[in-house]
Image (cartoon, rainbow, N blue to C red):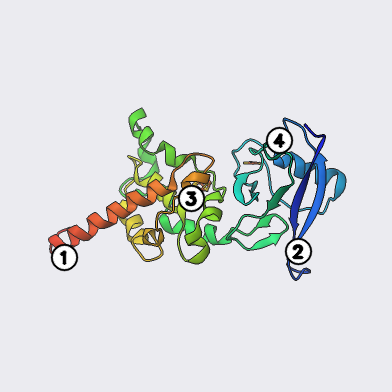
Amino acid sequence: MADSIQMNVTRYDPDQDSAPTVARYEVPLRKDWAILDGLNYIKDHVDGSLSYRWSCRMGICGSCGMNIDGEPKLTCAAFLSDYAPGPIRVEPLSNFPVARDLVVDIGDFMEKLPRVKPWIVRDDVTVIDGEYLQTPEELEEYKQFSNCINCMLCYAACPIYGLEPDFIGPAAIALAERYDLDSRDRGQRERLDILIEKEGVWGCTFVGECTKVCPKHVDPAGAIQRYKLKAAQENVMAFLLPRGTR
Ligand code: SF4
Ligand code: FES
């Protein structure tokens, strides 16, 4: 194995640059180094002005997502050696405005997420009523969808979100399903009302890239299909039952 590998990293300061440029850096090629270690090497030893996000280094915080050779990845979980002999292309996640270098602005997701009420909706009880116990089977129902770390890889991979920025997007829909499946929740009706709108699940043409790139196996494409079924059932009920009896 060679001693070093080249990383071709996008640099861009929207306040100063008319367009992004590519900077080429040589970093040590160590078997146990992730792409993030290569970026940290550049920042510590070559160019301290390089901007990118990270925090946990263990696939938990969701902040280190970037496009590596064109594919959305957690850079703390993708290894330099897997891209040898290189060079490795490191770019900001697609479909989001770039704030600086490899840092993207996820404000659009943060604005959309609360629309699906990603919390337990209960207005029939108060907190002082005590705990709401669940069986392991009830937990299992929604556990997969609760693994989302908001890393935005699914939005970067989604061609629909790229073309239709109003689309509420894969992770928000997966999180809606997470709460719908929670035995303590009563918010299914409210979420469905949001997700059967044009910018809800119908925007998705089931490309399925979101599920392929998800590092936590959340399966947002599966959540979208479930909501399409619920919406279709709702339409059938609306057709069969007179208004006010549903
Ligand atoms: S669904 Fe997966 S890819 Fe999308 S934000 Fe959540 S963890 Fe990341
Ligand atoms: S640094 Fe937290 S997920 Fe990569």
How crowded pointer 2 is (Cα within 10 Å; few <14, some 14-19, many 20+) is rated as: some
**Contact between labelled residues 1 and 2, with CB atoms less than 8 Å apart:** no
- Residue plotted at (69% across, 40% down): 83
Mark 2 or mark 1, earlier in chain = 2
Whole-percent x, y for residue 21 in the image? 76, 62
SS of the residue under disc 3: helix
Q: Nearer the viewer, mark 3 or mark 1?
A: 3
Mark 3 or mark 1, earlier in chain = 3
Q: Provide the residue designation for mark 2.
A: 13
Q: Is residue 98 left or right of residue 7?
A: left
Q: Amino acid at mark 2?
A: Asp
Q: Provide the residue designation for mark 4.
A: 81
Question: Which mark identifies residue 176?
Answer: none
The C terminus lies in which quarter of the figure? Answer: bottom left
Residues at marks 3 and 4, CA–CA distance in whole angstroms: 25 Å
**Contact between labelled residues 2 and 3, with CB atoms less than 8 Å apart:** no
Q: Provide the residue designation for mark 3.
A: 209
Residues at marks 2 and 1, CA–CA distance in whole angstroms: 55 Å
